[in-house]
């Protein structure tokens, strides 16, 4: 949960930067002006910092922190919030997207990190960031594309929808060939989709003719275990209610008790409807 903000003057050396994050991109001329302004005027705009236990993480202001270190500035203004690393990642995602120019590859890595390391489902990412669900799903899907596709994406030679279509080609050499076609002819996403559909069809036909098992489908959407039933489900089938640790523990505890009671009554009276058991727990 986000706490009350307070400003402190901190040594930039104590401020950590998450390995996975989005950083605003400057053009060379603008970055030079930015560095020159800090040298002349100092840092007026506070850095946004998350306090997670003993760690102080930069949410917003990495460029200011880096310039302070380069220029030997020993104290920088920081706006501090009590915040978990997961909340930090979500906030970093929002703030840098609002500024406009960011690297799509970094956006992919942040969302992948949220999903894999912080158990943050698509629903929660959409709710907390305001991003479109379709875009979040695409970004997760393209996390395994060839580095050349990532590079083209960061250079804005292709869009996220292009990278998503290319990710449907499992063979990376096929991804690169199709990327070249896309760059040369500046294909709209719908035309690239048609080209990828045709390529997948041809790859499948050739494999069957050679008696091989064609591998043409894209990698499956990542799955994660449900905390209640422990089953494995695709991302799009999961929901992410925002709960504190106490409420989360109560929810899981109540669920486990209801299941145990249901299984007990099933043995005693087979066919008892689950709804009656759950109703008794309320």
Image (cartoon, rainbow, N blue to C red):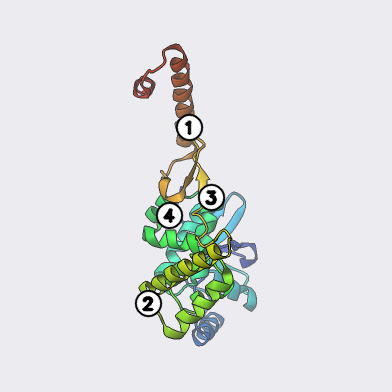
Position of residue 232 relative to residue 187, above or below, is: above
Front label number (2 vs 3):
2
Expressed as whole percent of the image width and height from the top left, the position of residue 85 reads 54, 53
Within 10 angstroms of label 2, few (less than 14), some, or many (20 or more) residues?
few
| N-term-proximal mark, 3 vs 4 | 3
- Disc 1 is placed on an element classified as helix
Mark 1 and mark 3: span between their CA atoms?
18 Å
Expressed as whole percent of the image width and height from the top left, the position of residue 34 reads 51, 81
Residue where numbered disc 1 is placed: 252
Residue where numbered disc 3 is placed: 118
- Disc 2 is placed on an element classified as loop
Residue where numbered disc 4 is placed: 125
Front label number (4 vs 2):
2
* Rendered-image quadrant of the C terminus: top left
Residue where numbered disc 2 is placed: 188
| N-term-proximal mark, 4 vs 1 | 4
- Disc 3 is placed on an element classified as helix
């Amino acid at each position: 949960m986000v706490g009350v903000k307070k400003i402190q003057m901190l040594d930039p050396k104590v401020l950590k930067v998450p390995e996975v994050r989005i950083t605003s991109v400057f053009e060379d001329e603008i970055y030079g002006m930015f560095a020159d302004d800090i040298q002349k005027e100092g840092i007026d705009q506070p850095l946004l910092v998350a306090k997670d236990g003993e760690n102080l993480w930069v949410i917003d202001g990495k460029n200011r922190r880096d310039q302070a270190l380069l220029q030997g500035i020993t104290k920088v203004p920081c706006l501090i919030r009590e915040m978990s690393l997961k909340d930090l990642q979500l906030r970093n995602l929002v703030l840098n997207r609002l500024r406009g120019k960011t690297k799509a590859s970094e956006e992919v890595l942040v969302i992948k990190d949220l999903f894999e390391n912080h158990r943050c489902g698509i629903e929660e990412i959409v709710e907390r960031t305001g991003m479109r669900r379709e875009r979040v799903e695409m970004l997760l899907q393209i996390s395994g594309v060839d580095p050349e596709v990532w590079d083209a994406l960061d250079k804005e030679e292709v869009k996220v929808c292009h990278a998503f279509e290319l990710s449907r080609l499992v063979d990376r050499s096929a991804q690169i060939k199709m990327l070249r076609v896309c760059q040369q002819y500046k294909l709209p996403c719908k035309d690239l989709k048609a080209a990828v559909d045709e390529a997948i069809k041809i790859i499948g036909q050739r494999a069957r003719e050679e008696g091989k098992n064609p591998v043409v489908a894209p990698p499956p959407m990542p799955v994660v275990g449900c905390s209640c039933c422990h089953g494995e489900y695709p991302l799009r089938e999961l929901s992410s209610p925002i709960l504190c640790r106490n409420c989360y523990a109560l929810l899981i505890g109540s669920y486990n008790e209801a299941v145990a009671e249901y299984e007990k009554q099933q043995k005693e009276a087979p066919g008892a409807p689950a709804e009656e058991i759950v109703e008794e727990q309320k």
